[in-house]
Image (tube, rainbow, N blue to C red):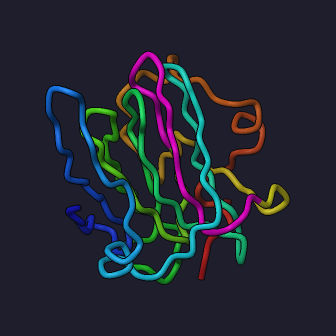
């Protein structure tokens, strides 16, 4: 696998080696020793999967404080734009974001450390999205930042009228300036 550090420290794009032939393809998705040599020790506890249709935007989500989660995400089917927003107040990239296209074609993975908000937008008819997390879901500690927050300024590649949000994101997402951040 190739590990590429993004412009935000701690956020990585991982490109697996894919071996294709007339039968299909084979790839290794995760090798703990190799992962730790490049990124460091992360104790993943759970794998999650979601299926979403075109225009669904899940995010920008995070869990606060000690309940923060590191994530290793990828797309099994379809295509998304995946975004990580730095919420580490002491970071030189605080409030900045990095985005990457993930698809069943490019097989990229995206590692987002603790201290970040995360979201993705489905660009294909459907997408199956899977991710590993290093901390359990704690609904009482979850938070959401408005996907279209002007301070962050994420460049989502579809018109806002085509974006489909959950009721929770419509009702509970806050502006970046109001978000609880990490020290």
x and y, in percent, of residue 180 in the image: 68, 67
Q: Which quadrant of the view contains residue 39?
A: bottom left
Q: Quadrant of the N terminus?
A: bottom left
Compare residues 155 and 82 and report the one nearer the observer.
Answer: 82
x and y, in percent, of residue 10 in the image: 38, 74
Q: Is residue 146 above or below residue 15?
A: above
Q: Main secondary structure of the magenta part?
A: strand
Q: Which quadrant of the view contains residue 4?
A: bottom left
Which residue is situated farthest in the front direction here?
23
Compare residues 127 and 122 and report the one nearer the observer.
Answer: 127
Q: Is residue 131 left or right of residue 31?
A: right
Compare residues 46 and 70 and report the one nearer the observer.
Answer: 46
Q: Which quadrant of the view contains residue 183?
A: bottom right
Which residue is situated farthest in the right direction here?
140
In this picture, which residue range is highlighted in magenta?
A: 120-137
Q: Is residue 96 above or below residue 146?
A: below
x and y, in percent, of residue 138 in the image: 79, 61
The residue shown at (70%, 75%) is: 65
The residue shown at (79%, 63%) is: 141
């Amino acid at each position: 696998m190739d590990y590429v550090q993004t412009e935000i420290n701690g956020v990585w794009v991982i490109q697996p080696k894919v071996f294709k032939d007339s039968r299909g393809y084979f790839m290794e998705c995760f090798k703990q020793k190799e992962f730790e040599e490049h990124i460091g020790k992360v104790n993943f506890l759970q794998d999650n999967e979601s299926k979403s249709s075109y225009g669904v935007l899940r995010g920008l989500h995070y869990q606060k404080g000690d309940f923060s989660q590191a994530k290793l995400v990828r797309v099994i089917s379809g295509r998304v734009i995946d975004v990580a927003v730095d919420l580490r107040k002491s970071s030189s990239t605080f409030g900045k974001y990095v985005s990457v296209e993930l698809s069943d074609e490019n097989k990229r993975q995206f590692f987002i450390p603790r201290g970040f908000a995360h979201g993705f937008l489905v660009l294909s008819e459907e997408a199956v999205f899977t991710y590993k997390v290093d901390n359990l879901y704690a609904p009482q500690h979850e938070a959401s930042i408005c996907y279209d927050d002007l301070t962050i300024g994420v460049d989502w590649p579809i018109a806002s009228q085509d974006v489909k949000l959950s009721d929770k994101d419509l009702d509970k997402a806050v502006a970046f300036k109001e978000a609880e951040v990490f020290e």
